[in-house]
Image (cartoon, rainbow, N blue to C red):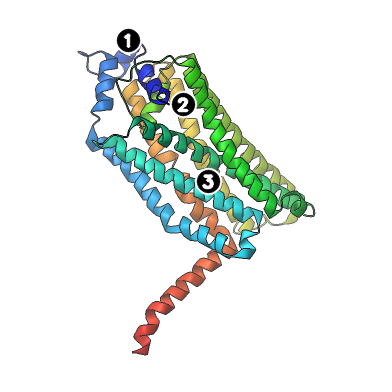
Amino acid sequence: MNFSLCVPARILNETIYYRELVINTTFSLEKPPLQSLQEWIIYPPSSKTKMFLIPPIVCLTAAILVIPFILFVIFSRDNIRQETRYLLLANALLCDLIYLILYAVSAVFSVSSFSLSKSACVILLFLLAMTYCGGLLTAVAMVLDIYLAILWPLHYISILPSSRAKKLILLLWVSSGICPGIIFLILKVTQKPSTCPVENCSVPIILVMTLQGDEAVKFCYVLSISALLLCLSLILCCYVILYFKTKQSGIWKSIFSRASVTFLMHHIILFFHFTPLLAAVVEALLYVNAIIGPQTGVWVSLIICNVLIILPKALSPYLCGLRYREISSSLKFFLRWKNTTVVSPALST
């Protein structure tokens, strides 16, 4: 499995065009661009890169405060656990929480003096890709579930009962493992063995080095971005169809109606999912056309990975998960019960 780490290193050893030296003023004119980028990776500007640790840690903290409670409510109550929408919600939140934890670990190691072993780095990168794909595929399944429940309410229970939903979730996990597995396999077959002068487990840096790779590496990059955009486009199309199908029902008359607010929140999350992918596409186009250099690409990738990608994962439980009445009512009951247990001993004295 060392190919996953050798690929970025091999990509790093590809020829960098001289015009990037002119465009990217952050490079030293006395040093070759390759050497300057290697030094930046090995000895990054710690004061600036450590600032990018703040968004992952804040988002992880925000997610930990509410996601475990939502999962506890879903799996502890039989009536909630038997509904497909709650099972899919639990799976999506679980994928997001695991992704945030793994990415925070990856971000901490990327700016610290400690380094992960090759096998640990490979596993970490694979799990990051797997949980990201799992969350996105589950989001697609949730939208399709809503689509079936609204447009075919009489046949919904027979089409997607809870027993079938559990099999669907298992299929989602298998699919989310197969998708990055295919990319890893393509890279293993197409990339020649080489030495690994630079070992790095940072996702933003790997993304920048991918843009300097050969045709197979770039094909994997384009394939991944296209698949993600396809999933998000499918979600958007389902929402648009649902809006026009239910427009005559009267649930959209008031802008403050529950349907309107829920619809708006889902679109906010969808917008935050689209933004990093579009930013990645723009970055790739600018980089390939030598409008920006490698160091600028690293800074842009840091913003995409450490801010734009993780932000919707921290917002989802608040904007979507707590919108369910059963979950929010359970939260209110828990808070009231906690306040009662805290106050009652003082009253008894």
| Residue 266 % position (x, y) | 57, 48
Residue depicted at x 60% and y 55% = 86
Residue depicted at x 37% and y 13% = 14
Q: Nearer the viewer, residue 239 or 168?
A: 168
Q: How many marks?
A: 3
For disc 3, the marked residue is 269
- Which image quarter is the C terminus in? bottom left
Mark 1 to mark 3 CA distance (whole Å): 41 Å
* Image quadrant where residue 114 sits: top left
| Amino acid type indicated by mark 2 | Val
Q: Earlier in the sequence, mark 1 or mark 3?
A: 1
For disc 1, the marked residue is 18
For disc 2, the marked residue is 282
Task: Kindly state the secondary structure of the residue where label 2 is placed.
Answer: helix
**In contact (CB < 8 Å): disc 2 and disc 1:** no
Give the side of residue 333 with respect to residue 243, left or right. Answer: left
Residue depicted at x 32% and y 26% = 199
Task: Kindly state the secondary structure of the residue where label 1 is placed.
Answer: helix
| Amino acid type indicated by mark 3 | Ile
* Image quadrant where residue 211 sits: top left
> Is residue 243 visible in the rendered structure shown here?
no
- Which image quarter is the N terminus in? top left
Q: Residues within 10 Å of mark 2 (few under 14, many from 20)?
A: few
| Residue 115 % position (x, y) | 28, 34
| Residue 286 % position (x, y) | 42, 21
Mark 2 to mark 3 CA distance (whole Å): 21 Å
Residue depicted at x 54% and y 48% = 92
Q: Earlier in the sequence, mark 2 or mark 1?
A: 1
Q: Residues within 10 Å of mark 3 (few under 14, many from 20)?
A: some
Task: Kindly state the secondary structure of the residue where label 3 is placed.
Answer: helix
| Residue 235 % position (x, y) | 62, 40
> Tag on residue 133?
none
